[in-house]
Image (tube, helix red, strand yellow):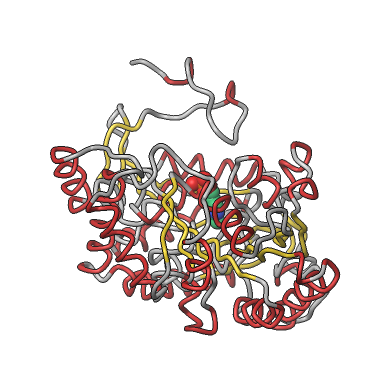
């Protein structure tokens, strides 16, 4: 069989070392390869297949839209684009707001920044983000991201970006003794950076409210605290909800856990927006920003803006989340998964921290010693023991995701309870093996 290794440059790897089976099908929380091996997906691939694989409602909507009309540009209107924009504004409670469509998360974040700067009439306005964050792999997004791996490729100051320390309570950069103290100090650090830079020259603070690629789940007081500080300083708050939305953190959008006290001025979406059936991203802007942008020339565009196939998929995805009560399901199963992982933490010394659990998203951080909290490998390296664990799990039919010394558990929201408990049982056994080795 033809192997893409001979022709494709793969992402986030040394391409010559890339080695993976060829996936030929999927259904629900499973996908399978050309040799007939079946895998239970414990990470929704890149934390994006929230609806599982080949969700019938979404597949049907794509098929029907393909037969009706595949493509129109932004110069023309189309029904699925209008309907999806309306549905998103309603779900977010962004009354009289507006939606801009993109192709993925990175260009959604770039456009959110562009719009914040344009609405504030600060074309070079400063953006404040944080360490240990990830906003995408385009140049501007590498500058936004607090990601040490790409720092040599881009200078954040040249993109008018400043980083503050992160609300990483397990290893609090402020030396705090509790989660809430760490959250409080992380918010204070943002306030101090706003004061240092000068609120009048800042366009926005850009942060992930909950789940994100680099494995931080902020303490509960962090997001409402950020909202309060940005509001009192007259600075826009952009919520990167690319990973955290559509049930992943137990709500449509993770900030909704805090009600209006967490409502951002702009929000970026991708991944779960179509459950990854078709690429699509979006930026939602508040009424205040919409009023500013509506009367200015927008020097921006994407050929595939609001692609009808993607918008039809997005609409069908929203219907599926609603009809199957998947947001509530994720909250309930996420709580159960978190409780089980906490139980495993009591049993396995190698588990230093378990965080998340607001929905079907949890981070398990591995250490060589839970007392000193020594990481199993220095960030962002992946310890060989963890690579071996994931390889063994895969050979036994369960696919786990890893970043550095973190295991990321983010199964599709449609996963069966028995499948979830089998996967956690396997993890328990593999951790036993790792510890006895
Ligand atoms: C929080 C967050 N923001 C942005 C992105 C970038 O999204 P994309 O890969 O679709 O460009 C990601 C991707 O993992 C993400 O997790």
- Does residue 219 appear left or right of residue 162 in this picture? left
Q: Quadrant of the N terminus?
A: top left
Which image quarter: residue 201? Answer: bottom right
In front of the other: 118 or 56: 118
Residue 332, position in %: x, y? 36, 75
**Who's the residue at 45% across and 40% down the image?**
302
157 lies above or below 410: above
Which image quarter: residue 322? Answer: bottom left
Which image quarter: residue 98? Answer: bottom left
- Residue reaching furthest right? 196
In front of the other: 433 or 331: 331
Residue 246, position in %: x, y? 38, 64
Residue 431 visible in the picture: no
**Who's the residue at 65% across and 60% down the image?**
350
In front of the other: 331 or 273: 273
Residue 101 visible in the picture: yes
**Who's the residue at 72% across and 53% down the image?**
124
**Who's the residue at 26% across and 51% down the image?**
28
- Does residue 343 appear left or right of residue 145 in this picture? left
Residue 296, position in %: x, y? 53, 57
Residue 375, position in %: x, y? 74, 56
């Amino acid at each position: 069989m033809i192997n893409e290794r001979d022709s494709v440059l793969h992402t986030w790897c040394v391409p010559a070392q890339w080695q993976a089976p060829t996936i030929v099908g999927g259904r629900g929380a499973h996908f399978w390869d050309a040799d007939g091996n079946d895998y239970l997906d414990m990470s929704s691939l890149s934390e994006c297949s929230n609806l599982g694989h080949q969700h019938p409602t979404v597949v049907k909507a794509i098929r029907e839209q393909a037969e009706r009309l595949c493509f129109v540009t932004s110069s023309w209107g189309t029904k699925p684009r209008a309907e999806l924009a309306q549905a998103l504004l309603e779900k977010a409670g962004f009354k009289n707001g507006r939606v801009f469509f993109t192709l993925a998360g990175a260009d959604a974040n770039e456009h959110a920044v562009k719009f914040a700067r344009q609405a504030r009439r600060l074309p070079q306005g400063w953006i404040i983000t944080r360490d240990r964050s990830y906003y995408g792999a385009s140049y501007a997004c590498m500058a936004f991201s607090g990601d040490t791996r790409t720092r040599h490729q881009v200078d954040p100051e040249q993109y008018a970006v400043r980083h503050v320390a992160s609300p990483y309570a397990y290893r609090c950069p402020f030396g705090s003794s509790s989660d809430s103290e760490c959250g409080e100090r992380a918010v204070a650090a943002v306030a101090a950076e706003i004061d240092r830079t000068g609120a009048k020259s800042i366009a926005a603070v850009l942060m992930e409210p909950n789940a994100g690629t680099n494995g931080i789940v902020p303490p509960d007081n962090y997001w409402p605290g950020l909202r309060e500080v940005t509001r009192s300083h007259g600075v826009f708050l952009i919520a990167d909800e690319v990973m955290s939305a559509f049930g992943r953190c137990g709500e449509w959008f993770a900030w909704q856990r805090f009600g209006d006290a967490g409502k951002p001025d702009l929000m970026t979406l991708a991944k779960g927006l179509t459950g990854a059936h078709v690429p699509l991203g979006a930026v939602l802007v508040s009424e205040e920003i919409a009023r500013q942008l509506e009367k200015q020339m927008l020097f921006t565009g994407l050929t595939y803006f609001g692609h009808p196939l993607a918008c039809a998929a997005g609409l069908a995805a929203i219907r599926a989340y609603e009809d199957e009560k998947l947001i509530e399901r994720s909250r309930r199963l996420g709580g159960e998964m978190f409780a089980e992982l906490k139980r495993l933490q009591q049993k396995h010394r190698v588990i230093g921290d378990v965080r998340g659990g607001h929905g079907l998203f949890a981070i398990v951080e591995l250490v060589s010693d839970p007392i000193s909290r020594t990481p199993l490998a220095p960030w962002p390296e992946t310890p060989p023991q963890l690579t071996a664990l994931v390889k063994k799990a895969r050979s036994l039919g369960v696919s786990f995701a890893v970043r550095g010394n973190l295991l990321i558990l983010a199964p599709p929201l449609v996963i069966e309870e028995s499948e979830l408990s089998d996967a956690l049982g396997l993890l328990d056994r593999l951790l036993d093996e790792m510890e006895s080795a």
